Image (tube, rainbow, N blue to C red):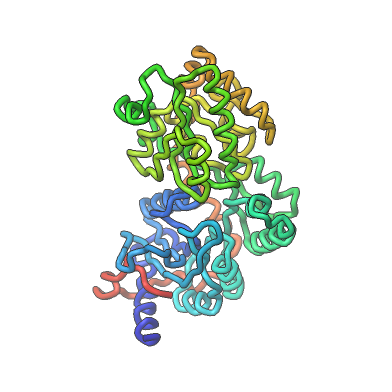
Amino acid sequence: MLPAMNQTQDLMIESFALQAASLRIAVVTETFPPEVNGVAMTLGRIVEGLLQRGHSVQLIRPRQKLENAGASRNGIEEILSPGVPVPTYGELRFGLPSKRRLVKLWSVRRPDIVHVVTEGPLGWSAVAAARKLELPLTSSFHTNFQSYSQHYGLSLLKAPIESYLRKLHNRTQATLVPTRALMLDLQSRGYTHVKLLSRGVAAELFSPSKRSPALRRTWGAAEDDLVVLLVGRLAKEKNVGLVISAFRAIQQIKSGTRLVFVGDGPLRQALQATCPEAVFAGVQKGEDLATHYASGDLFLFPSLTETFGNVVPEALASGLALVCYGCAAAQELITSGVNGILVPADDALQFISAAVSVAGSAASLTQLRQAAAPSVAHLHWDAIYDRFVGHLTQVIESNQAGFHATSEHAPVDAVTRASASAPVPF
C-alpha cells in the first residue's frame, strides 16, 4: 500500500504549481472549510483570494472525522495527514507529527513559502521541516490557547503553552495577527517579527437587507419584538452564560424579548436546560447565516478569548446593535455609543447594564443599528488578500538566496493535471 501511496503522492508533488502562478504557497492547518469556526472561515476566504489572483496553494491538513475521502477542491492541491481528535472539539483533529514526510515532500518540489496557520503537532513539524530546508516561513496567530486553558481546568499548563507558542512563532520569519492590540500584546510577551493582517467582511453577504419577518415568526417574534442574538460556538471559553444573564435582565423590562443562539458546541445541552425558552438554531452557513444575523436586533458578544472575532464585523454588516467587551475586533471596529457599545473587559455587571440600557431605549437601538453597516462597509476582503501576499513576498525577498531551485516548473502530463485538485493521504 505504501509504494502506491508514495507513487500517488509523487504525482501530486509534480502537480504543485501546474499553472503559471506568482507564488507557490504551502499552507499547513488543522482546520479548513467546510468546518465552521473563525480560523477555518478566514483561511478559506484567503485561499479563495489567492487562487483568484493566480497563486498556487498546497494545503496540508489532517483528514477530519466525517470527511468524504473523495472530496476535491478546484485549484488546491491537498495533502491529508493522519490526525487525532482535539479535546473538547471532537469535530476537529490535530495533525500528527510529520517532519520527515514534509521534508521529503518539499525537497522534491519546493514551495516558494510555507505558511503555518495552527500550532498543533503538524504545525510544529512544518516549522521544523521548512527551517531544515531553509524555506521562507510565516505563521498566523489565531487562537489564545493560553487563555482557553483556564476554562478547561488546565491553568497549570498556561505557562508551558505560552512558552510553546512563543517558541513556534519566533522560529518563523513573520507572525501575522488580526489586530493592533494583539500585535502589541504579543510583542510585550517576547514574540518577534509580528505583523498586522486585519480581516474583511463579506458585505455582499451580510446585510440588513437579509432580514426575514418569516424567520422571526418561527422564533415567536413579531416585528416590534426585540430579538437578542448570539452567533458562535457554545462553549465555556466564549462566556455564553453571560448572554443568558443579560437576557433575563432584559426580560424584566421587555417581556416579549426572544433569545436566539446560532451555533453549536459542548454547552448546548446545559444552556437548553437553563434557558428552555431560547431558540437554538444550530450551525448556519452562507445565505442562511446572513438571514439569521439580519433577523436579530441586539447582538451580545461577551467572549474574552478572541484574537479577532469574525462575528463582530458580520453582526455590524448585518445592521445589529452590538454590546461587546472592549477587546479584539470590537475594540478595533466599534466606537462606543456610535455603532455599538463597548464594556470594560470582564465587567459582567456593566455588560448586563449596557445590554439592558440599549434594549430599553428604542432611540438608542435604532441609532446603533443604523450606524452599524456603514461603519464596516470599507472592510473589503480584496485588500486583505493583497496585504497577505505582500507580507509573504517580503519574507521571500528577504530569504531569496534559498530559492534558486524554485524558478523552474516541471513538465506536466494529462494524468498529473487530472489529479491536481484531489486530496491524497499523507
What residue is shown at x 72% (from left), y 49% (from top)? 187
Residue 288: quarter of image: top left
Position above or below: 308 against 114: above
Position above or below: 248 against 80: above
Q: How many marks?
A: 0
The residue lying furthest to the left in this view is 414
Q: Residue 347, position in %: x, y? A: 69, 32
Q: Residue 266, position in %: x, y? A: 51, 51
Position above or below: 232 against 52: above
Q: Is residue 219 left or right of residue 252?
A: left
**Front residue (pair 23, 353):** 353
What residue is shown at x 56% (from left), y 32% (from top)? 333
Residue 335 visible to the viewer: yes
Q: Which quadrant is the C terminus positioned in?
A: bottom left
Q: Is residue 362 left or right of residue 21?
A: right
Residue 396 visible to the viewer: no
What residue is shown at x 55% (from left), y 52% (from top)? 391
What residue is shown at x 53% (from left), y 20% (from top)? 359
**Front residue (pair 153, 144):** 153
The residue lying furthest to the top in this view is 363
**Front residue (pair 373, 196):** 373
Q: Residue 290, position in %: x, y? A: 37, 36
Q: Residue 383, position in %: x, y? A: 47, 41
Residue 203: quarter of image: top left
Q: Which quadrant is the N terminus positioned in?
A: bottom left
